[in-house]
Amino acid sequence: MHGLSHLQTGSTLEALTQATIILILAVAIVISNLIVVATYLNFKGPHEVINYYLLSLAVADLLCGLFIVSLSVYPAFSGEWIYGDVVCRFVGYLEVTLWSISVYTFMWISVDRYLAVRKPLRYETIQTKTRCQCWMAFTWISAAMLCCPPLLGYNEANYSKTTNICMLEWGNMAAYSATLAILVLGPSVISIVYNYGYIFTMMRKVRSGAPIHDKEYATALAENLANPSHCMSFALVFSFWISWAPYIGLRIYELVTGETIDNPLLHFGAVWIGILNSFWKIIIMTSMSQQFRLLVRLLFLTICCKTKGRLQAELIGLDPDD
């Protein structure tokens, strides 16, 4: 009896610890991404095109915090899913959809940065606000449609007690799962690797003093390469894949070997380290983008005192009423 009581106490303590971790993560993701969304929406002046992509990422992360992470807090403590099968299936669908949106958005960010370096003289005419918004609308709609079969009843979602999250069962739809993975990962990974490879090659070429005969092109290229958005966007992409690498590696290992690793802590850590990426973005953006720091400062000054907010906007050359 004493051993059973000790086991139950340990199990309760583990559940409480996991629920607390998920709760802290939910609050951090929701608040941080609300700040990002509010920061970009608050500023009415001219935006860099990349800001629209970052806004899309923040909205996806905010939805993840509200509907995926938050709904996992109580089940993590109780050990069972209490919201019903429909909600579980919706959460599983939302996970795949939001992940696909993030991957596609990183692809568009890499394309945007590539065009800024490849065609610096024509960049502003190629990458317009309207074109960017159309690509993001296309991304959200296409990702939602590609991942919708589970909502139509073709697939089931199960609550995983080891990860405390609802996940879709893709095993009975192997062909569709493989096709979806290829459609999402194929063009995205190839574009990201090629585009950033080209950007860093050009950075190295300019820094080495390699001759560029067209003076106008050389000047525009040097100005674009000096933009911190290149390194910041690469850091965002890199952190995303590093965060999800443990889970992807674990899934690939289990798929190839046909063995399920019986280590609940490993599965829990792999999933939630990946989801933690939704919080890291604001830290990267704050540390690497002076423009974002100024816009955040403008947001809080506008909230505290509208007059001070306008004064701050004038001081940094950004007019919130433009």
Image (spheres, rainbow, N blue to C red):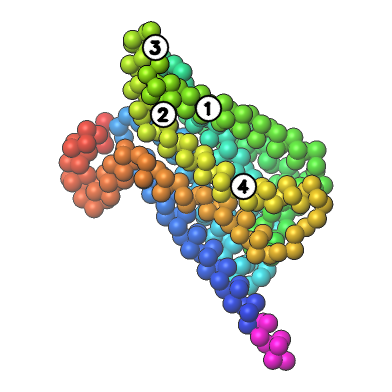
**Amino acid type, label 1:** Gly
Q: Main SS type for the magenta part? A: helix
Q: Residues within 10 Å of mark 1 (few under 14, many from 20)?
A: few
Q: Going 65% across and 77% down the picture, which residue do you hit?
A: 11
Label 3, on which residue?
212
Q: Which mark's residue is nearer the viewer, 2 or 4?
A: 4
First-in-chain label (3 vs 2): 2
Crowding at mark 2 (Cα within 10 Å: few <14, some 14-19, many 20+) = some
Secondary structure of the residue carrying tag 4 is helix
Badge number at residue 49: 2
Judge from the rendering whether residue 254 lies leftward or rightward of residue 287; answer left or right. right
Closest to the camera, between mark 4 and mark 1, is: 1
Residue assigned mark 1: 197
Q: Distance of mark 4 from mark 1, alpha carbons? A: 20 Å
- Of callouts 4 and 1, the N-terminal one: 1
Give the farthest residue toward the bottom.
Answer: 1
| Percent x, y of residue 47 | 35, 31
Which region is colored magenta?
1-8
Q: Quadrant of residue 14?
A: bottom right
Residue sitting nearer the eye, 309 or 23? 23
Q: Is residue 274 above or below residue 148?
A: below
